[in-house]
Image (cartoon, rainbow, N blue to C red):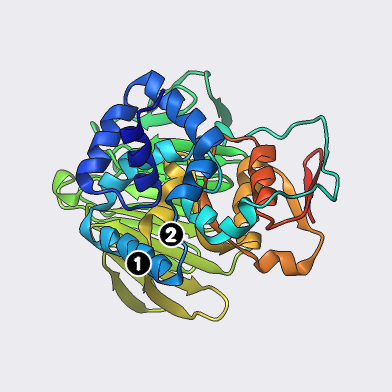
Amino acid sequence: MISQDIQRLIIKYLTRQATLLERNKLELWLEAHDNYKMFKEYVKINYLIDLNMEMFDSDDSKKELLELIDKEKKQYRFRKYTRVMKYAAIFVGIIATTYFFKDNIFSKSVETTPIIVDTNTVEPGTDKATLTLGDGSQIALEKGEYLKTQNANSNGEEIIYKANQINTKELVYNYLTIPRGGQFFVVLSDDTKVWLNSESQLKYPVRFIEGETRKVELVYGEAYFEVSPSTENKGAKFKVFNQSQEVEVLGTEFNIKAYKGETNIYTTLVEGKVTVNYENRKQNLMPNQQSSLDVDTKNFLVKEVDVYNEISWKDGVFSFERKPLKDIMKVLSRWYDVDIFFDSKSLEEVKFFGVLGKDQKIEEILETIKNFKIIEAYEIKGKTIILK
């Protein structure tokens, strides 16, 4: 049984009211495997009932809650927040979603439209990629499959390149291509770490030339970079090229989202410093800022963002804050390798605020969204999903 004290901590944490001390206490408690299982069951089975007793009712209280959340964002560093957030990702639509849709949740609903689910269950994505070597040959990388080459080793979940031990004068490039329903992690020869999301491709040299600018290309898709600092690479800068822009960095962490078929390129800085170069112009980004470049109009904007919502995907979480369903379904279609359609155009713009665990079945996610009365029903036929 979970003690009343821990239950209160869980509720305070999920409502983002927990203090740093309370977060630390909850994190320590979650480290025990049995406690994690109890947490998971408590959230899935009891959470909505407990929530009804804890939530504020008035508009003033709602405003107060949002002010507390904003205050915590400014007070505590991003890293502390993300260490425990992964535990909350085991269910769909956390407290934030429940808060804004709570009037619908606690009323009994009658099933009016049948849900048709194909027996061919859609599975969540997994670690997989295709490695293209310098000679053009391709190697499939899959979880549980091991690979050892002259330059790199892989266990099917990541590929690690050997450090720059040879002062090479010629660049040999590899491509790492992540399909829909996949993800992968790569450590480059300079110890730069890159997380690649579904439907992405990265071009990079097997070894960098000592003393020269380290250049890689995000051909398309989404990638999170943790760049090895120039001080550890004889002053060599690091640049990421993709489509219409170039990102120049010093030891830093940032995310680039540049999918095929989408007009905007998003660059989000977590920490450090980057300069975005576009159309012969330069723009420096500060931590917690995101640039958006429209590749068609060349319009360029910079705004403050909640960093966690932008990069949680690499930690096994999809976090959405007032995102329209059409944007959310793009993310889910890539991860579950499905095609999602809307029965009604008006559904596309309905906002959703919540957290989805990447290890969940698509039926669980859709059922929860349906329970919030955001959609009336859904239909799954093989790799096609229709929202109604």
Residue sitting farthest toward the front = 53
- Vertical comparison of 235 with 125: above or below: below
Report the amino acid beneath label 2: Phe
Q: Quadrant of the C terminus?
A: bottom right
Q: Is residue 179 left or right of residue 299?
A: right
- Vertical comparison of 208 with 349: above or below: above
x, y (%) of residue 144?
Answer: 52, 18
Place residue 76 in its image quadrant. Answer: bottom left
Depth order, front residue of 215/178: 178
Q: Is residue 285 left or right of residue 201?
A: left
Crowd rating for badge 2 (residues with CA inside 10 Å; few <14, some 14–19, many 20+) = some
Q: Which residue is mark 2?
A: 56
| Mark 2 or mark 1, whichever is nearer to me | 2
Labels in figure, total: 2
x, y (%) of residue 39?
Answer: 43, 30
Q: Is residue 302 left or right of residue 93?
A: left
Q: Which mark is residue 64?
A: 1
Which residue is at a point 38% across and 61% down the rendered structure image? Answer: 306
First in sequence: mark 2 or mark 1? 2
Which residue is at a point 56% across and 32% down the rendered structure image? Answer: 126
Which residue is at a point 62% across and 48% down the rendered structure image? Answer: 332
Disc 2 element: loop
Inter-mark Cα distance, 2 to 1: 9 Å
Report the amino acid beneath label 1: Glu
Q: Quadrant of the N terminus?
A: top left
Which residue is at a point 23% across and 53% down the rendered structure image? Answer: 77
Crowd rating for badge 1 (residues with CA inside 10 Å; few <14, some 14–19, many 20+) = few
Depth order, front residue of 328/81: 81
Disc 2 and disc 1 in contact, CB within 8 angstroms: yes
x, y (%) of residue 387?
Answer: 77, 54
